[in-house]
């Protein structure tokens, strides 16, 4: 073994070179080990272990370890250098196999290299035995196996180079450097090469080895990094494509769903239009006479009350004309009821030709009709009645000929009740009949009620009574609240409060009405009310009408008569005291409900 002197000043330069070479090998080894942690490459890991082993072998062989370690370990360093050298060759064979893995010809030599390397390492372990013959034998066998293993590695590199593998060049240079190290050791052992020359040769060979291995590992790191980046980029592109495909699929699903929703919306709108049309037809059927198309009594009562309120509030006149066909029974008896019905239909057609848009024709019963003329005083109503009488009298009814009618006319007197007014008009019609028929008679003013007109708010007051209760605490409390809110709204309108105040009261009423409808429907659903669906349709129609009135109020186009009719006839009389009473029996004990 080559041993350096203890540390004389002239030997400091060779010592520094030896330390630099060992440090360089350690640095390259650590770089490979650290790179392996990020890149997960077996060749980098094996190269790192190889570099550390070569550095340790060099330190033991060159005497650097003797300076760094205690003197007691000096006999061990020589024997350890032989083991570390064998281990270095075995690790390099592993590195070479990893670097040339893409070469089929080089892979064929891997099993032989592995066996030779294990054999060399096993023989080298004999050097650790403290027996000179064993150490000498180990040195001799190692001197033969080390060049053989390096030769096999060189052959594998040449084969890979012929196949065009780029990493083969680095393998060849490192292997040649190892062969140079083996040759220098043989020459030194045979005293053919001096100590200084052998050390210089080893240092030069190891420097070439370290430099070449460093470049080779850097190239592999760069290639692995590029490959990793390419794989990550490919994965990112694949994920992007998958994401794009997923987005496209979701967009398609969303478009389909939106299309379905749009179709559903159109179907719902169509169904809503059909429902609105059905409600209009139902409302028309419920408020008109099916034969003549004239209003019925219900529609008349809904419309006349707002006119009476306007008469009280604004002193706006309103007149009634009651008419009856003369000798109509004779038409039915002579020509049959079918012809009689046609006479009634033609009569309404003739009358409508002479009415204003604001006038209304009502079938009062049988052959008896009413004409409501808003904004008309008695003299105007008399002129209209005479025009209607003459038009009917001159009309030739098919299969019948001439038919006449008698008419009674009256103007509403502030303070009289509706029934009194109708009775007064009926008395005028009776006089027309009594005086010979086919004439117009005005009501006698002396029969007008002399009662003092009640205050406007009294006429419009809505008062809750215990008899309106159904027996359910929730429904009754909500009904009573709606009575109060509707009454306060009418008072606000009557007293001509600011439009903002009226709108606020109307908004409050609508909110409570919607809440009541919701609670009522939920309760009826629990009770399995068979007419719930129809009841819900009525609720929806009432809310639609209420919102339309609210919109008119907000834009300053409030129709007092329409508002009054909605509150009194639709909400209170028509629904709370009418439609809702159909389910009152659900809240009463069986004995009470069946009496």
Image (cartoon, rainbow, N blue to C red):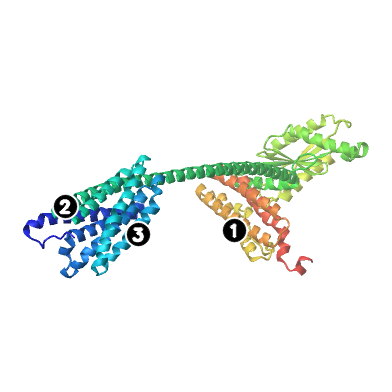
Q: Is 168 located above or below residue 15 in the figure?
A: above
Q: Residue 261: x percent and y percent?
A: 60, 44
Quickly name the residue at label 2: 193
Q: Quadrant of the N terminus?
A: bottom left
| The C terminus lies in quadrant | bottom right
Q: Nearer the viewer, mark 3 or mark 1?
A: 3
Q: Residues within 10 Å of mark 2 (few under 14, many from 20)?
A: some
**Cα distance between the residues tagged 2 and 1:** 125 Å
Q: CA distance from mark 3 to mark 1?
A: 106 Å
Look at the numbered disc 1 and give the secondary structure of its residue: helix
Which quadrant holds residue 407? top right
Give the label, 2 or 1, closer to the camera.
Answer: 2
Residues under numbered marks 2 and 1 in contact, where contact means CB atoms less than 8 Å apart: no
Rendering coords of residue 212 (x, y %): 26, 47
Instruction: Look at the numbered disc 2 and give the secondary structure of its residue.
Output: loop
Residue closer to the observer: 455 or 54: 54
Question: Which residue is tagged 1?
Answer: 484
Crowdedness near tag 1: few (<14), some (14–19) or many (≥20) residues, C-alpha within 10 Å:
some
- The disc label shown at residue 118, or none: 3
User: Is 477 situated left or right of 242 in this image?
Assistant: right
The quarter holding residue 477 reads bottom right
| Residue drawn at (76%, 68%) of the image | 590
In contact (CB < 8 Å): disc 3 and disc 2: no
Residue depicted at x 62% and y 49%:
564
- Foreground pick, 524 / 473: 524
């Amino acid at each position: 073994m080559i041993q350096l002197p203890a540390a004389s000043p002239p030997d400091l330069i060779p010592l520094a070179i030896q330390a630099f070479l060992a440090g360089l090998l350690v640095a390259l080894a650590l770089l490979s080990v650290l790179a392996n942690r990020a890149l997960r490459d077996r060749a980098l890991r094996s190269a790192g272990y190889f570099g550390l082993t070569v550095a340790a072998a060099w330190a033991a062989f060159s005497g650097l370890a003797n300076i760094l370690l205690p003197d007691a370990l000096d006999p061990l360093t020589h024997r350890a250098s032989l083991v570390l050298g064998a281990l270095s060759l075995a690790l390099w064979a592993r590195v070479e196999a990893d670097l040339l893995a893409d070469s089929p010809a080089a892979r064929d030599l891997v099993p032989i290299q592995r066996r030779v390397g294990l054999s060399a390492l096993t023989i080298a372990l004999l050097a650790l035995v403290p027996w000179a013959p064993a150490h000498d034998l180990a040195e001799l066998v190692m001197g033969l196996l080390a060049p053989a293993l390096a030769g096999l590695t060189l052959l594998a590199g040449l084969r890979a180079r012929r196949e065009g593998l780029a990493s083969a060049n680095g393998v060849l240079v490192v292997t040649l450097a190892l062969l140079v190290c083996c040759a220098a050791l043989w020459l030194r052992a045979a005293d053919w090469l001096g100590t200084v020359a052998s050390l210089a040769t080893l240092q030069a060979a190891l420097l070439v080895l370290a430099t070449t291995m460093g470049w080779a590992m850097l190239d592999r790191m760069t290639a692995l990094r590029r490959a990793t980046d390419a794989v990550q980029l490919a994965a990112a592109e694949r994920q992007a494509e998958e994401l794009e495909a997923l987005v496209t699929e979701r967009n398609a699903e969303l478009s389909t769903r939106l299309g379905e929703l749009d179709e559903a919306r159109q179907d719902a709108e169509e169904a809503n239009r059909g429902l609105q049309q059905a409600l209009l037809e139902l409302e028309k059927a419920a408020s008109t006479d099916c034969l003549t198309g004239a209003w019925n009594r219900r529609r008349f009562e809904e419309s006349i009350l707002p006119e009476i309120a306007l008469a009280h509030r604004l002193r706006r006149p309103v007149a009634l004309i009651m008419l009856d066909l003369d000798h109509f029974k004779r038409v039915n008896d002579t020509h049959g009821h079918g012809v009689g019905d046609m006479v009634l239909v033609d009569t309404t057609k003739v009358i409508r030709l002479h009415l204003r848009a604001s006038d209304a024709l009502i079938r009062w019963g049988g052959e008896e009709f009413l004409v409501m003329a808003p904004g008309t005083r008695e003299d105007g109503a008399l002129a209209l009645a005479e025009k209607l009488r003459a038009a009917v009298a001159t009309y030739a009814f098919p299969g019948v000929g001439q038919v006449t009618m008698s008419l009674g006319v009256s103007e509403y007197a502030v303070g009289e009740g509706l029934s009194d007014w109708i009775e007064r008009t009926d008395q005028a019609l009776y006089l027309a009949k009594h005086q010979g028929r086919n004439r117009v008679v005005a009501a006698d003013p002396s029969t007008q009620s002399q009662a003092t007109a009640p205050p406007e708010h009294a006429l419009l007051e809505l008062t809750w009574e215990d008899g309106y209760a159904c027996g359910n605490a929730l429904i009754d409390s909500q009904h009573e609240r709606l009575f109060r809110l509707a009454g306060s709204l009418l008072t606000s309108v009557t007293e001509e409060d600011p439009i903002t105040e009226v709108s606020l009261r109307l908004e409050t009423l609508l909110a409570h009405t919607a809440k009541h409808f919701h609670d009522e429907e939920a309760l009826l659903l629990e009770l399995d009310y068979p007419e719930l669906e129809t009841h819900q349709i009525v609720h929806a129609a009432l809310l639609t009408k209420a919102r339309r009135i609210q919109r008119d109020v907000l834009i300053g186009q409030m129709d007092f008569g329409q508002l009054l009719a909605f509150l009194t006839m639709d909400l209170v009389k028509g629904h709370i005291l009418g439609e809702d009473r159909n389910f009152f029996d659900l809240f009463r004990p069986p004995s009470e409900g069946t009496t």
